[in-house]
Image (cartoon, rainbow, N blue to C red):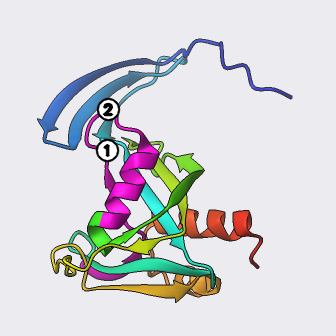
């Protein structure tokens, strides 16, 4: 049965901004449900981001090992970042970020999936692309320790192991699984 997307919401929401920065806005929403129950909900709005699952002809994926201070953990991640402005094409952003962060420029990118990682609390659109035919252009680029400790090609088949070890962020989990599916890898 098809979902009726034309039905207007019955929730009444007003927001009070608390903090705004370059890529985020934090607000408190005052919510009234259809049954008149009222509550407050923190709401985070984040600039859309794009990531690239760069895969070579041997089904290896380009990954970065990064420290994430919020969780105080080292994680494997796909290259990616925020769109420069609302009009930037997410595919262009994904290719640009792959090149800037790793020195590898994908010859082509195709959309894999877009999603919201925390739909109950945040509006943070994430766009993931599959990059192919990467060419190394980073002869003058060195790995920026502020970006990554290491950049390397890893077997895409190992994605399930990384997921089981809880060593990936959500964009990497979703992107690697979508790439395995698109490429017919099991």
Residue at x 36% of width, y 43% of height: 48
Could you tell me residue 46's position as x and y percent? 30, 42
| Vertical comparison of 24 with 106: above or below | above
| Vertical comparison of 111 with 107: above or below | above
Residue 38 visible in the snapshot: yes
Q: Answer with left or right where residue 84 lies relative to residue 89.
A: left
User: Residue 86 falls in which quadrant of the image?
Assistant: top left
Q: Which residue is disc 1 drawn over?
A: 83
Could you tell me residue 149's position as x and y percent? 24, 85
Q: Which mark is residue 12?
A: none
Tell which of 101 and 133 is nearer to you. 133
Q: Residue furthest right?
A: 1
Tell which of 170 and 106 is nearer to you. 106
Which residues are drawn in magenta? Answer: 72-99
Local SS, label 2: loop
Local SS, label 1: loop
Magenta stretch encompasses residue 20: no
| Vertical comparison of 87 with 117: above or below | above
Q: Which residue is disc 2 drawn over?
A: 86
Are the two marked residues, 1 and 2, in contact with CB atoms closer than 8 angstroms? yes
The CA distance from mark 1 to mark 2 is 7 Å
Q: Answer with left or right where residue 92 lies relative to residue 74.
A: right
């Amino acid at each position: 049965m098809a979902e009726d997307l034309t039905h207007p919401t019955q929730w009444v929401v007003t927001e009070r901004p608390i903090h705004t920065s370059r890529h985020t806005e934090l607000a408190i929403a005052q919510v009234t449900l259809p049954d008149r129950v009222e509550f407050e909900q923190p709401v985070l709005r984040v600039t859309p981001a794009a990531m690239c699952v760069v895969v070579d002809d041997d089904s290896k994926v380009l990954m970065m090992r990064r420290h994430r201070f919020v969780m105080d953990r080292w994680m494997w991640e796909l290259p990616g970042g925020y769109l420069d402005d609302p009009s930037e094409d997410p595919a262009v952003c994904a290719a640009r970020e792959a090149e800037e962060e790793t020195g590898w420029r994908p010859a082509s990118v195709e959309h894999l999936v877009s999603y919201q990682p925390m739909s109950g609390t945040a509006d943070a659109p994430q766009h993931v692309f599959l990059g192919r035919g990467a060419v190394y252009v980073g002869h003058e680029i060195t790995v920026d320790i502020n970006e990554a400790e290491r950049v390397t090609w890893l077997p895409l088949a190992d994605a399930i192991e990384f997921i089981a070890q809880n060593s990936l962020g959500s964009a990497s989990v979703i992107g690697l699984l979508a790439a395995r599916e698109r490429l017919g890898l099991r």
